[in-house]
Amino acid sequence: MSDIPQFTAVNLLTGFLGSGKTTLLRRMLADPALADTAVLINEFGEAGLDHHLVERIDENMVLLQSGCICCTVRGELVDALRDLHSRRERGLIPVFSRVMIESTGLADPFPTLSTIKADPVLRHHFRPGNVITTVDAVNGEGNLDVYVESNRQAAIADWLVLTKTDLVGADVIEALEKRLRQLNPDATVIDVHDEALSVAALVGSSDATRGNGLQSVSGFYCEDSRELVTASGEVHSAAFRSFVITIDQAIDWTAFGIWLTMLLNRHGDRVLRVKGILNIAGEDRPVAIHGVRHLVHTPVHMGGWPSEDRRSHIVFIVDGLDATLLKRSFEAFAVVSSEPAHGPTPLMSQNR
Amino acid sequence: MCSLCGVLGGAEHWSDAAARPGVFTRNVERIDRRRERANRVAAANRILAAYALTLSDWQGSSFVLANKTGKSEVIEDLGHLWPAAERMIGRPCDPLDPGLVARLEDERRV
């Protein structure tokens, strides 16, 4: 059983009702990159249908049918993953190196990831992988206006896949993309019809990929973060907000850990996303951190700096937290190291 | 287990400098490990002072959180520190509490 990976990535495919999750899953399953993938499909309602639509019923596919994955199915999800793992270890099913979960359109995506991390068995065998969120170009803006679930699904995404873009004009797509970038500035937005859409890239391959995924061509994905507003210009009722803390000096890892654990303990429900590249005092290479609400992934040493910029950048996507106070708190906790790393520059040079 | 943090006793916490290739680590050498734990205790105590709590190392494997009257609790890592501190003082430990932030800012100016 040496082919069984030490940790199996669990990718989550989410997106609002009717946004094209199953269509995308069908396309992904036809791609060789997903050949060794176990699939879990969750549906809300009496009768499961999606698993018929994907047309790939085999022993590696499980339908979680008893309700929404964010609440009632959590136990079932644990059981299904444990069962898959057990059958793989006993050689009863082919070795799979990845799990793909298609969640219901109304699911809050966070509990799924925390379930994997919290379960005493699963945490030793599975790791949360990329989150792929489909956003319907026809109804996407309307859903973001009305449904908090839609905002959460977009905020958590590593990849935002725009669907139904052939049904609307370029101006609608542009407006939707702009809105999504405000909500989740460091996710990659891609059109489902784009020939460059790579299934292998969507699912990623390892934690190292996640760290490197923080890099954009210009160095970092968070150049357009600001307060999230509705189309009418009002601050969004859900008070989602993204902002970046940029720190010129090296960071004291220990103080940072104390500050972030304290923040997530008290406000983890409202920290939808925290993601960053850190210049740690005493370290040559940057360290990538990646967290979703109360869950923080194991920090990853990146291979090198993405650009000449040696500052630390931390992206926050929060729900109702005061960004100014959060930055003040960060500074007051002495998260920066006493070791001057890059000269007498301002502590926070970027404040959006 | 802390149901909020998803942290299990004895398991590795993200803030630990895990001695494993490919992840953030400063625990490779014994001296580093001791220094890291000492730093951790000192940094935590700076914040815990605002709540009249103290943290100390326990045999290099756990930490002991205590209040002024001697009530104490063993914790494994930073993931357990704040829920334990809140239980001990009976109120939230909020890093965004303006009073706490102002206090820490004053300390930094001294």
Image (cartoon, coloured by chain):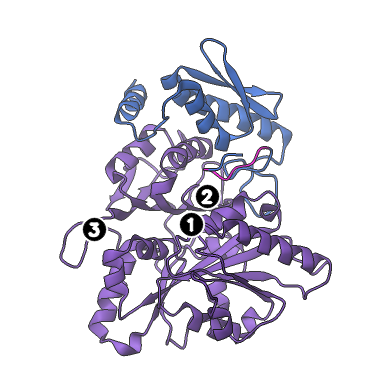
Question: Which of the two labelled residues, at mark 2 and mark 1, occupies the earlier sequence position?
Answer: 1
Compared across the picture, whether A220 is left or right of A115 comes to left
Q: Amino acid at mark 3?
A: His
Q: Do dots 2 and 3 share one subunit?
A: yes
Dot label at residue A236: 3
Question: From which residue to which does the magenta span run?
Answer: B4-9
Q: Amino acid at mark 1?
A: Phe
Compared across the picture, whether A344 is left or right of B59 comes to left
Mark 2 burial class by Cα count in 10 Å: few <14, some 14-19, many 20+: many
| Mark 2 vs mark 1, CA separation in Å | 9 Å
Q: What is the letter of the purple chain?
A: A
Residue behind mark 1: A110
The reply to whether residue A246 is visible in this rendering is: yes
Tell me residue B100's x, y (percent): 35, 27
Rendered view: A167 above or below B1: below
Q: What is the letter of the blue chain?
A: B
Compared across the picture, whether A16 is left or right of B70 comes to left
Parent chain of label 3: A
The residue sitting at the front extreme is A46
Parent chain of label 2: A
The residue under the point 31% across, 42% down is A346
Find numbered disc 2 in the image and state the secondary structure of the residue it sits on. strand
The residue under the point 44% across, 45% down is A268
Contact check, label 2 and label 1, Cβ < 8 Å: yes
| Mark 3 vs mark 1, CA separation in Å | 21 Å
Rendered view: A176 above or below A285: below
Mark 3 burial class by Cα count in 10 Å: few <14, some 14-19, many 20+: some
Tell me residue A298's x, y (percent): 59, 51
